[in-house]
Amino acid sequence: MTEENTPVAEPTQVIPAESKWGEGISSNQSVCQAAILRSGRQDRKHKQVCAIIRGDNAKLLAGFSRWLSGTYLHRKAIRQQVQDVEVFINTFLLSDQVITARRGVNWVAAFLSRKSIGASPNSLLEHAASLKKFYTYLNEKGKTNDEELQAVKKAIKIGMPGWLARVELGLDASEPTSTMNTRTVSLHVRWPA
């Protein structure tokens, strides 16, 4: 039986030894213990898949670096932009789930929102610029389409004022969004006298 087809049971349920859920476990072990055994296998599988994706990402990053070398940017700026993208595609996208760089277009806003916590405004703007350039590179190479590139640019354009406000106010992840929105409005809106 494959791990994807393994049914989920209540945590208090005891699995018989001959059960299809509890392959290799005694009748005394709970579903939670069986889940731990399964999660160990899933963790190994996750690491294997991530290793393959990181190999693909290394090729993308090398191509991105060469692509940036053809621009007016200094080597130090190129290295920084590649590092910014590497954090996104090798750390953020592969932390909990397995998301390829191409599919990462849907996660740019979440990444920058999380980056806005404890970041400087310049750092946040640099990460956003790096991601825009990276997805422009992928678009030019035919790895993303125009709609995906526009989605990245639009997500950054729409989200950036709120992320910068979060940075300027020094809000952290525990601060409710409603408080952030209230404070943001009070900072940026001038009421008529």
Image: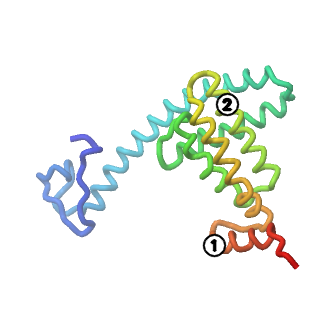
Residue in view at x 31 percent, y 49 percent: 38
Query: Which quadrant holds residue 42?
Result: top left
Q: Is residue 20 left or right of residue 168?
A: left
Residue 109 in percent (x, y) is at 62, 50
Count of all numbered marks drawn on residues in the image: 2
Residue 142 appears at what percent x and percent y? 58, 22
Apparent side of residue 174 relative to residue 186 in the rendered image (left or right): left
**Residue for badge 1:** 178
Tags 2 and 1 in contact by the CB under 8 Å rule? no
Give the residue drawn at x 73%, y 38%.
130
In the image, taking residue 62 as reference, residue 23 lies left or right, namely left
Identify the amino acid type marked 1.
Ser
For mark 1, does the 10 Å Cα neighbourhood hold few (<14), some (14 to 19), or many (20 or more) residues?
few
Q: Position of residue 111 (x, y in %)?
A: 62, 50
- Quarter of the picture holding the C terminus: bottom right
Q: Position of residue 76 (x, y in %)?
A: 84, 32
Q: How is the image coloured?
A: rainbow
Give above or below for 146 relative to 7. Answer: above
| Residue plotted at (28% across, 44% down) | 3
Q: Secondary structure at mark 2?
A: helix
- Give the quadrant of the N terminus: top left
Q: Which residue is mark 2?
A: 136
The answer to which of 141 and 54 lies nearer the viewer is 141
Q: What residue is shown at x 60% (from left), y 52% (from top)?
A: 110
Distance Cα–Cα, label 2 vs label 1: 33 Å
Identify whether 64 is placed above or below 3.
above
- At label 2, the amino acid type is Thr
